Amino acid sequence: MNTLFFILPLFFQASKAAIASPACPKCGDLEVPFPLSTNANCGDSRYRVYCHHGVLQFKSSGGFYYNIHSIDPNASKLIISPPQIKKGSCSSSDLYLGGLRLDESLPFNISTHNTVMLLNCSDNLVFSPLNCSVNSPCRQFEEKTEEGNGCRNTLCCSYLKDSAMTAHMIRVRVGGCTAYTSVVNFKAGDSIETWNYGVELQWISPN
């Protein structure tokens, strides 16, 4: 009986936040699970996402909106779409902001399941630890997709976003690489038709 009285307060304490701040309504076809919040009346305001005309979006620290195309509340993860690559210029639509940058004061970071492909890179990246070889998956992206086709005949490099790197930024810049895409859970040998394009973000659960 004493064990029961000990467990019950913990249960109510853990449930208190979710009861006080219910999950937000759906945005388009996507459920918005707690702690994600689309307005002041639901979720946790630290986990802000935005519902614009039925499209759920994540806002970077620079104010760029990325569409969210899936959420896994059990794993505390969501996947955002990479920015569009502008035709004719091989530049990402967030280039003017330096790429994807997360607010480090918020409970989101870039997971270690992203294989990032940098496009239209300067030649000095050949000497970096990135995979800039002819076997880099970015070559397939350039050769076999319409979006990547405009970046052909330039240097491209790829890397797996790991824990040794900053977890809050994918950087592009003029004079470096001007475009990027990302594939979640990439495996060498997978057909390009099966690639899961996106940037996986994870969040720290609320206290």
Image (cartoon, rainbow, N blue to C red):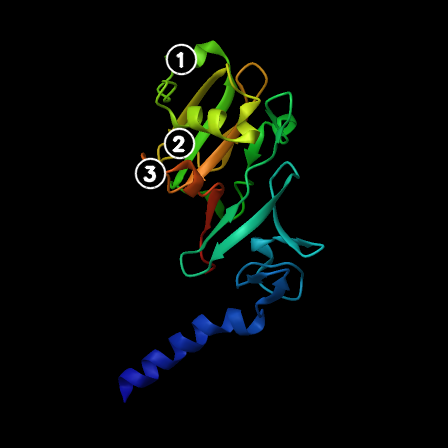
Residue 172 appears in the figure: no
User: Which three-letter amino acid code belongs to the residue tagged 3?
Assistant: Lys
Q: How far apart are marks 3 and 2 (CA)?
A: 20 Å
Residue placed under numbered mark 3 in the picture: 187
The tag on residue 165 is: 2
Q: Which of marks 1 and 3 is nearer the N terminus?
A: 1
Q: Residue at point 35% right, 19% down?
A: 129
Give the side of residue 33 with respect to residue 196, left or right.
right
- For label 1, count other residues whose C-alpha is less than 10 Å away and answer few (under 14), some (14-19) or many (20+): some
Across and down, in percent, residue 113 comes to 38, 41
Q: How far apart are marks 1 and 2 (CA)?
A: 19 Å
Circle 3 or circle 2, nearest the eye:
3
Across and down, in percent, residue 72 comes to 45, 57
Q: Which of marks 3 and 2 is nearer the N terminus?
A: 2
User: Which three-letter amino acid code belongs to the residue tagged 1?
Assistant: Val
Circle 1 or circle 2, nearest the eye:
1
Please, is residue 3 above or below residue 20 in the view?
below
Residue placed under numbered mark 1 in the picture: 126
Give the side of residue 135 with respect to residue 109, left or right.
left
